[in-house]
Amino acid sequence: MSKTLKHDLIYHLILFILVVMTLYPLFLMFFTSFKNNEQFMQNFWSPTLPAHPTNYIDAWNAVSPYVFNTVLVAVISVGFGLLFASLSAYAFARLNFRFKNFLFIALLALLMIPGLLTLIPQFVEIKAMGLFDTYSAMVLPYISGMQAFAIYVIRSFFESQPKELFEAARIDGATEIRAYGSVAIPLAMPILGTLAIMNLLNVWNDYLWPMISVSSPARWTISVGLLNFKGQYSTQMFYGPLFAGYVLASLPLIILFIFCMNYFIEGMTSGAIKM
Amino acid sequence: MLSTARYENMIVHYFGKRGYRMKSKKCLKIGAAVLAAMMALSVGMTGCQKAENASSTTSASGSTASGGSASITYKGTINFYPQAYNPVAPTQDNPNPPTKFKEVAADYQKLHPDIKISFVANPPAGTDYETWLKTKAAGGQVPDLVWEQAPNANTSASGIWTDLVPFMNKANPYVEGNKQWIDLFPKAVINQIKDVSGKIYVIDADYVDTLIFYNKAMFQKAGITETPKTWEEMIEDCKKLKQANPGVAPMGIDMSTSNTVYSWFARVFNSNLYYKDIDKIDIDGSKGNSTLSKIVAVKKGIYGASDPRWCTEWFQVMKDFSQYWQPGYSTAPQGGIIMSFVNKKVAMYYDGTWANKSLKDDKAPDFGSFPVPQITANTCKGGNDSINTAGAAGGPYAAWQYAIPTKKADNSMTDEKLQAVVDFAMFTTTPENNEKVCNELGEFIPTIVGAKPPESLSGMAEAAQHELLALDGACNLSMPLQQSLTRELQQYLLGKKTLEQAVQACDQVTKKEVDQQIKQHPDWDIDKYLK
Amino acid sequence: MVSTKSINSFRREDKTLKSKGEKSQPIAYLLLLPTFLFLIVFSYTPAVQAILYSFTDWDGFNAPSFIGFDNFIEVFQDPVMLQSFENLLIWTGITLVIGLIVPFIGAELIFHLKSKGSQYWYRVLFVIPMVIPGMVTLLIWGFIYEPNIGLLNNFLRVIGLGHMTNDWLSNPGTALFSLAFIGFPWISGLNFLIYYAGLQNISESILESAMLDGCKTLTRVFRIDIPLLRGQFKLLLILGLIGGLQNVTTPLVLTNGGPGYDTYVPGLYMYVSAFQQSRFGYAMAISIILFLITILLTVINLKFVKTDTDGM
């Protein structure tokens, strides 16, 4: 045991310093969120008592609609997006049909298209469809945007599974859809989970699209709303409630992370995404 | 018959070989259930949302058409964004918002019970207003009566704003004896806000001025007994302030792209330097304020790099001046430059007359104000002692500039609604209402003929009755142009570009803007002025 | 990112199915329907529209008018564009160098730990910042760089380097670099996870035989780890380049492209052209150029950067 420790000591030292440097700003944000302004001015570097959880009440009033909107948009986008993607990946992996080759290449071609290219035309389209400033406008392009990569990955996954798993379903006389539902999806749960998390993060963190597709404050997501929230404190910078708002905005993802912590790490690093 | 259990066993068996974590699987099951529930909830919410949208539009469109040009038949809501006069709820940032427009709206609603005036929330803090407005226009959602400065309205994409001239020629039913609505506005104001083809997009009923506010205590400490009357005196004062108050910047200037101080200085200097050639620029009686005169001046090269009065001279003055500014002047400071003054980081700062109220609200240290000091022959080449242009950084460009969008920019606008919106606008521009609303805020003076400003601001009232000499070098053609010019000045001040490079870049970007505007507005006829 | 090998293998497999005389299963089209419906409306059509609009002069409100290649000519003559690309090169250069090297070092450090428990916990800790929403991270870094009470300046004052405090985001000398260095100490992130996954994939036998051969750690890293991780390097290189090209939010939120045009990047210029200057055609032209650069980089990456799996 001590041999391990001795061997590891130098690594631990360096890593420990790096972890502290990485996490300190977040830690600062967290304990500052409980301070009022005097406490902040006097003691910048460490937590102070008494704590002021009232900051969270102010912040919650302002930030909760944004959190709700973001959760709504993220869940719908990722849910439908992966649903459609897994259906198509199943088709590409297990079924045979004309134009299969062509359609797949067409799909992969989309991976070349950077988000910036389609950003403004999508805005123009949404406006033309009369969907400007609606939840649909926020969700639909995300669903579309995640298809190419998700299908590619899920398909690779299906391909790498032994055929017997799927054949067994066919022998039993199941329709393809049934096979899909009962076999393919449970099988693909790990990869779907990883993709869900990746895309959830993408949608959660996006700023440009929610900014341009939506103009009423009621529909803002966290990215857009936090800027406005910060601007409201422009005269006197009250960092307590401001940081409380940031913490609240981060909470849903942190909760998800704790819930599926193992999975998050294993999923990303298990090599489930074959390069 | 298939059973998922059978396949689950296979999966577990298969993954068992790979060391798949069962724990994660359970986590996923819970996660999946939560996901499903949320998706169901979300879809349900979106459905409710759509239904709500649908029902609200149907109720608004159920209006009956009837005859009589004088009768307002519109039934429904009018969305109004009055900028500084917006009767919002008090917030931390804004503890004493105005209330009078609510009264005015209530009075109007008594006369027209089928119409409801709804005040639009302020745009998000920190956003570029023009961008916000343009995005709304692209989405067909501009409020029915909305704040927009005349110069910007005149150079917006054509088809966004309704031409108000036909309505201006009608009588205002709420003012006794009024034959034409346009008579209620000072002629000088009308002259300045017309667009190139003579259209009027903006109802303009207030006026603003700019002042330099100073910290009385710091001035005393520096031994300054009188406010500076000339530019040179001001620079001398800056030197004294710097010595006497270490750590405090003598002058607070927010030269960022989110502020318009560039155009204030441009106006003060250009009005002074070009004064002798005012006739060359003033081609339509607007003293160089109209969009038309600016465009023609650029086309003729009067506003351009070849004329040193345009930028070359006063940029140099700025460079010298900038050594007294607060560090980091190219970025808007936290809370705005006004907070730097309140927090005693700067001894003086340049702001609009609205600051009188804001400074009191923010509990600023004891302050006074003086107009921008006189530019003399010593300030820069061509400086003109005989004319004081401090007021050039001001004008009918405050908060009571409201425009009405067309159906394209506001999908809810109909001819019927337009009549109602104009009627409401007429109601607000009675001298009583104009005075009531403006004087409550106390930041700008009302300009409707017959309205009286508060005592403290009476100095401005006289100015509002005359065309303002405010040659801006065309920088106010549009906000994006002004922002580009600000960036060029920033680069020169920060040493990234030489004076010549910066002025050339300004020239390039101004000419580009003018050409683009001409292309986008085929109804403008510039050629006859270029002969 | 998508290897030619996988596309080719797909083609081969497809042919075998056909030669076996397997029936076409039309139900597949039903399964593909939702996806392709969305793709046609929200991916292919916008891409085509981007190309079409780039040849017009459009204010986003009235009908567009065709102007041929004028927008593209203007892009190449626009001094702001030139500055944007200069900034982009510097910025992306810095982030790539940092992003390829530092997370790798971090991954190696953790990989070298003998205790699996420690490994696990360090990984968790380094992943936490990834879970913070992007906007919060940006705003926190805005706070770190804030000149009066920001974390960085405060820290410098406390350790006695008060003379080095700076207006990081407003100073022309430091603005761009400040933005490029966001993310300190640069370990947390996708790069780290991918490197770590790659290290985990190195088979035990190789590591053991290296140890038996008396190979010192550092030598092992250079002789074994890095060559075996070439695939990861290649992937992260292309991801970093493409990501860098599209970076708009950071300069928009933190500096608005200033001071002057010091933190202007092409993506930001595209956004400003469209939504502030109402020049949608010009904005599309900029995005087309960025798109072409993306394709060029991807092609170069596929053809010239060799990994261990290609052509062996």
Image (cartoon, coloured by chain):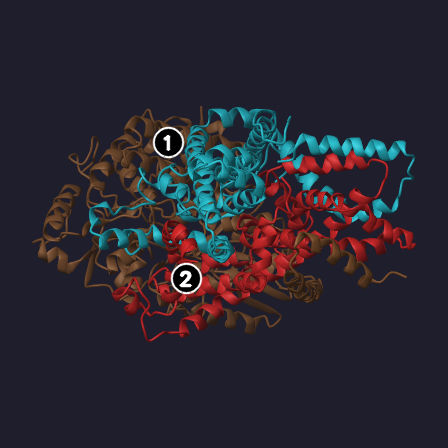
Chain colours: A red, B brown, C cyan
Counting other residues with Cα less than 10 Å from the Cα at mark 1, is it few (<14), some (14-19), or many (20 or more)? Answer: many
Give the image quarter of residue A37.
bottom left
* Residue type, label 1: Cys
Give the image quarter of residue B301.
top left
- The label shown at residue B506 is 1
* Residue type, label 2: Gln
Image position of C262 (left or right of C293): left
Please name which of the two marks, 2 or 1, marks the residue nearer to the observer.
2
- Expressed as whole percent of the image width and height from the top left, the position of residue C108 reads 46, 44
Q: Say which residue label 2 marks.
A: A232
Using the image, name the chain to which the residue with label 1 belongs: B
In the image, A26 versus B23, the foreground residue is B23
Question: Could you tell me how far apart the alpha carbons at marks 2 and 1 are, in whole angstroms?
Answer: 34 Å
Image position of B501 (left or right of C299): left
Image position of A122 (left or right of A54): right
Using the image, name the chain to which the residue with label 2 belongs: A
Image position of B485 (left or right of B199): left
In the image, A35 versus C212, the foreground residue is C212
- The label shown at residue B430 is none
| Residue C111 vertical placement versus B38 (above, below) | above
Q: Quadrant of the C terminus of chain C?
A: top right
Label 1 sits on a secondary structure element that is helix
Which residue corresponds to the image point at 40% horizontal and 26% vertical from the top-left? B300
Q: Quadrant of the N terminus of chain C?
A: top right
In the image, C47 versus B66, the foreground residue is C47
